[in-house]
Image: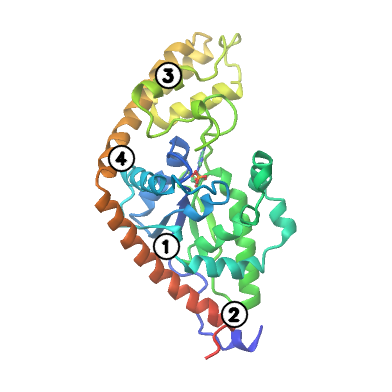
Amino acid sequence: MSEINKTMDPISPFPSKIVMSGIRPTGMVHLGNYFGAIRNYVKMQEEFECYFMIADLHSLTTHPDTQTLKSNVRRVLAENIACGLDPEKATFFCQSHVYETSELYLYLNMLAYKGELEKTVTFKDKARQHPENVNAGLLTYPVLQTADIILHRASLVPVGKDQEQHLEMARNFVVRFNHRYGNIFPEPHAFNYQQELIKVPGLDGSGKMSKSENNMATLYFADDDDTIRKKVMKAKTDSGPTEMNAPKPDYIENIFMLMKLVCSDDVIRKFEEDYNQCTIRYGDLKKQLGEDMVNFISPIRQKTNDILANDEYLVEVMKKGAQKSRESAQKTMELVRKAMGLNYF
Ligand code: AMP
C-alpha cells in the first residue's frame, strides 16, 4: 500500500447500510420495474438511508436522441412517486445533476478491463439489437452503474434479476479499488426482500417485461383499463393439461407467477386446483387476472396523472434531490481523491 494510503484517515469500509438504485427514463414504468425494484424502494425508505435515481445518463447509451428526455424523466419521477416512493424519506434525484458521478466513472474505468466488459450479457444483447451503435458508453455501462452506487457508499442495491451480473462486476471493481487505494467502499450487493431476485416475465411466454422490447407483452402503469384487459387476454396459453398434476409449461408457469403478484391466495389456489384436475379454463383465468391487474394498476395511473399535472412539484423534487445527492457525492469524492493521492495541496 502506498504512503498516501497508510496515512489516510481510518474509515469504516462498512458504514451503516446505505441503499442505492436507479431506473432509466427510456420509456414507461411497467410491472417488472415495480416488482423487481420499486416495491423494495418503498419498503427500504422506511428502514435505510436511500438514494434513488432516474438514470438519464445510462439512457444515452441506447437512446442518444434527447428530444423526449424531459417528458420521460418527469413521467418516471411521477410514476415512482405514485408507486409510493417518498422524496421526503429517500433522496430521489436525476443522475445528470450529480456531476461527481462522471469523475468517479473516469477513475473506475482505469480498473475495468475490456475483456470482462465485452463478456457482459447485457452488452452482448444490446450490441446485437443495435449493431449500428455499439458505443464505449454501452461497453462501460457496468462501470457507470458502479460509480452511481458507490458514490453514496451504498451496499444494498434493490434490483431485478437482470442486474445480477452488473452487481457482481461492481463488487469486482470495488475490491480492485480498495486493494489499490485503501478501504473506501463497501461491497455492493443486489437486494430483494423475498431473497431471490425477481424476473417478471412477458405475457407472450418468453423473455421479460421491458420498457422497449414488446409493447403487447408488457403491462405499463400508463396502460388504460381496456388495454390491460386486452393484453392479458392475449397472453399465451394452450388447450390445457391432459394429465392430472402435470408440470406446467413455461408460459403457463409465467401466468401463474403474474397471478401471484396481484391475485388473492384463494384465486390462485382455485386455479392451481383446476389445473391439477385438468378442469382449468384459461379464458376464466385470464379474465380474473385482467381484472386484478386493472385493480392494481389503475389507481397508480390516476395518481401519476395527478402528479404530472403539478410540474412545480416535480421541479422541486428534482432540485432537492440534486442538492442532497451532491452533498453525499462530494463527501465521497473528497475521500476518493485523497485515497488516490490526487490531493496536491
Ligand atoms: P430498467 O427499466 O432497465 O431501467 O430497470 C429498472 C429496474 O427494474 C432494475 O432494477 C431492473 O432490474 C428492474 N426490472 C426491469 N425489468 C424487470 C423485469 N421484467 N422483472 C424484474 N425486474 C425488472
- How many labels, in total? 4
x, y (%) of residue 174?
Answer: 60, 66
Q: Would you say the residues marked 2 and 1 are in contact, meaning their CB atoms lie under 8 Å apart?
A: no
Instruction: Return the residue at label 2.
Output: 340
Please tell me the numbered disc located at residue 304. Answer: 4
Name the element at disc 4.
Answer: helix
Residue at 52 percent across and 44 percent down: it is 160
Q: Is residue 99 left or right of residue 4?
A: left
Residue at 57 percent across and 16 percent down: it is 245
Name the element at disc 3.
Answer: helix
Q: Earlier in the sequence, mark 4 or mark 3?
A: 3
Instruction: Return the residue at label 1.
Output: 97
Question: Which numbered disc, 4 or 1, marks the residue closer to the eye?
Answer: 1
Please tell me the numbered disc located at residue 230. Answer: 3
Q: Earlier in the sequence, mark 3 or mark 2?
A: 3
Asked if the beta carbon under badge 2 is closer than 8 A to the nearest atom of ligand 1, the reply is: no
Q: Earlier in the sequence, mark 4 or mark 1?
A: 1
Tell me where residue 326 sits by quadrant: bottom left
Q: Is residue 9 above or below residue 192?
A: below
Q: Alpha carbon of mark 4 to alpha carbon of mark 3: how far? A: 22 Å
Question: Which numbered disc, 2 or 1, marks the residue closer to the eye?
Answer: 1
Tell me where residue 131 sits by quadrant: top right
Q: Alpha carbon of mark 3 to alpha carbon of mark 1: how far? A: 39 Å
Q: Would you say the residues marked 4 and 1 are in contact, meaning their CB atoms lie under 8 Å apart?
A: no
Instruction: Report the amino acid beneath label 4.
Output: Thr
